[in-house]
Image: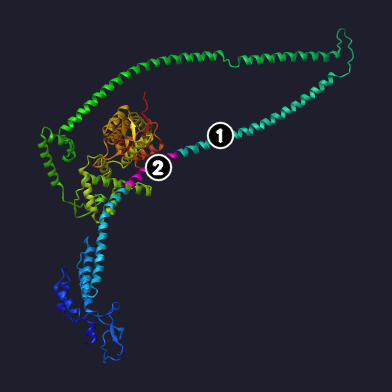
Amino acid sequence: MSTEEDIRLPPISMSERTSLEKGFRRPRSKIFTAKIESTLNSFSTWPAHVSSQTVKPRGQKHAGAEVNTHHGCGYEFGGSVAKPRFLEQLECYLKGELTSLDMLSPKLQEEKLQAYREVFDYFIEAFKTYKPLLSAIKREYDTTLSYLQEQIRELEPLRAQLVLLSEQCEQRILGLRELERAEIRAVKQEQQHLLQVIESMKEQQRGLQTQVCHLKEELAAQYLLYREERDARKLLIASISNMSYSTDEEPEEEQDGEKVLKDDDPVKEKLALKVCREDLSRAQVELNRLHAEYGDVVPRRDWENLDCMYQENLLKLQTLQSDFDQMKSEYDTLLGVHREVSMQRDSLQSELEVFQEASTPRPHWEQCADVIGSRERCSQLLDGQSSQKRLEILLEELSSISLEQKEFFTGLGRSSDVPIYLHYEGQLRNLRLKKNDVLRIIKDIWKGKASEDEKLDASSDLKEFLHKYLERQHGDQAGEWAYSLLDAIKRYLKDDFIGLFYDILTGKVDESLYHGQTLLLSHLLKVFIQTDSAETGLLTLSEFSEALRMAFPLKGEQDIEELVVAAQSNQETSKGSIAYQRLYTEDSEGGNSEFLALVKRQGMAERHQYINQLKVQLRDRREVSVEDLRTAFKIIDPTLDSATLDWNLSIVFQTKELRLHTALLDTEVALQRLSVANVSRAGPMPQLE
């Protein structure tokens, strides 16, 4: 046998090659197994590191020379030889298997691994000598791979928990950022105020310094005058002394009775000076005695005024004391009545619990209104019917609703009158989103939009952001999600949160309404936290009412009482305290509590009342200008600051350059634009005469 025959497998015809390639498909073909067994005895020693090379004997010099027949000796890697038949068969089978795989299949990697595993099995079967070792290696790899796959399956739930935890952390971080942003704004405002105070104090100090300099100059001039006067007085006294002790004698006058002896003048002066000093001492002693005796005595006029004020305060105190005694007696009476009512309530509550344990709970049929369509339709269908009949009617309505839902949506195209988030064509599958899914998506949209607006320092359009969000989250399936989300939103419009998102998306109301409600609820929570000085998470009824009055100083007592009753209804137990943090928890469907819903409704009612007051103020005008509307706002809300007033006017006239805007606007149009924006009262309504 020649060297060429030792190296290569026996030749295989084209039909045998085709049958072998077909035999490599799973399950393992008998033709390929028989061919492998037939070629094991003539297995090639073709080197693994050589591709398409020939084996050239050492003694060969010409084309017709003899070839050394010793197997495995005297070869050089210089020419080109074909691959061994067995290697070509394995590569051909592996290539066919990899080509037949579906590249979009989710189990692509497992199918590729199965193809390589079968080729390795054929390879192990070919090596009888190394089969135990190779089988042990393969078995160890399979065991390790199974162990790693089991570890991956165990870690999948942890990844879901990690995603949920990260979302919660992001929500908390956003809440803390909002609180920090509000605190930073307050600190900045306080800093600006303090800078203004410092500037005014510096200006006052400069004025005082100027006055001090002027007074110093006047004092120096006055001191100079006093010193000159002192010197002049000294000179005058010296001259007088000289004149007194002068020994010169004037000549006697001729008139009789007019002689004066000047030697007696110093003596008289000394006596007069002595008498004056004694009078001065007596006056000083009398003055000191008066100061000592009457130093703590007040004038009679002041004493009479203080006595009159004392009598008036005493009369007021007696009146208040009598009123207090009467109120205390009434309070004691009411306290006794309250104790009796509380005892009756506790007994009735215990009886009710006994009855509830013994009786079957009745379903709340009013909750079916959202499914059927409206409360009116629900009352028409269910009133006067038995529970069994109501159940049958509800099942019929549910079945009709499920039949009415479309399996596919038809895309509206890319025309200009179609919103950008609906620019899709063709048949789009209905994903049938539930209410929880809709609430989760809307909250995620608001969170992403807030983050993007903060980065851009400007408010983006909700329609464009929704289109970008769906494209980023779902890629090629963005159209299905857009139409399915819009269909689900229309089905759950009764929910306040979903209805507000739909109104903002369709342009019925301004986006500032959502941000206003968010700031309102966060401000209320901040006030609750500040009131809870003990950090127990609980507030008494009086503390809770006081916190509401602090957060909403413009609300009346009736509104405060309604909020307190709504907060008590959301508590599981009634022990005289309210867990304010539970008021901010969501229900199973992702909705807010009744307390927060009432806060939003009251805010909406106050906004409508504010707009109606503005409408009454503008009732005589068919058209308004910027100054007219500014004057009307100042009349009904004098405490409104200039920044908020300019924002309200920019919403009405849809421009930020208010000074350059001189055109008139229809009054109804102006009121309609204000009614869809977050416009609220800043201070109490002025008392009109």
Task: Report which quarter residue 223 is drawn in.
Answer: top right
User: Residue, x 10% and y 34% (percent of image)?
Assistant: 386
Residue extent of the magenta highlight: 167-189
Q: Residues within 10 Å of mark 2 (few under 14, many from 20)?
A: few
Magenta span: chief secondary structure:
helix
Task: Give the mark, 2 or 1, whose residue is nearer the N terminus.
Answer: 2
Q: Nearer the viewer, residue 475 or 180?
A: 180
Task: Give amino acid for label 1.
Answer: Gln
Which residue is tagged 2? 180
Count of marks, rendered view: 2
Residue 58 can be seen in this image: yes
Which residue is tagged 1? 204
The dot on residue 326 is: none
Q: Nearer the viewer, residue 128 or 464?
A: 128
- Residue farthest top in this picture: 257
Task: Give amino acid for label 2.
Answer: Glu
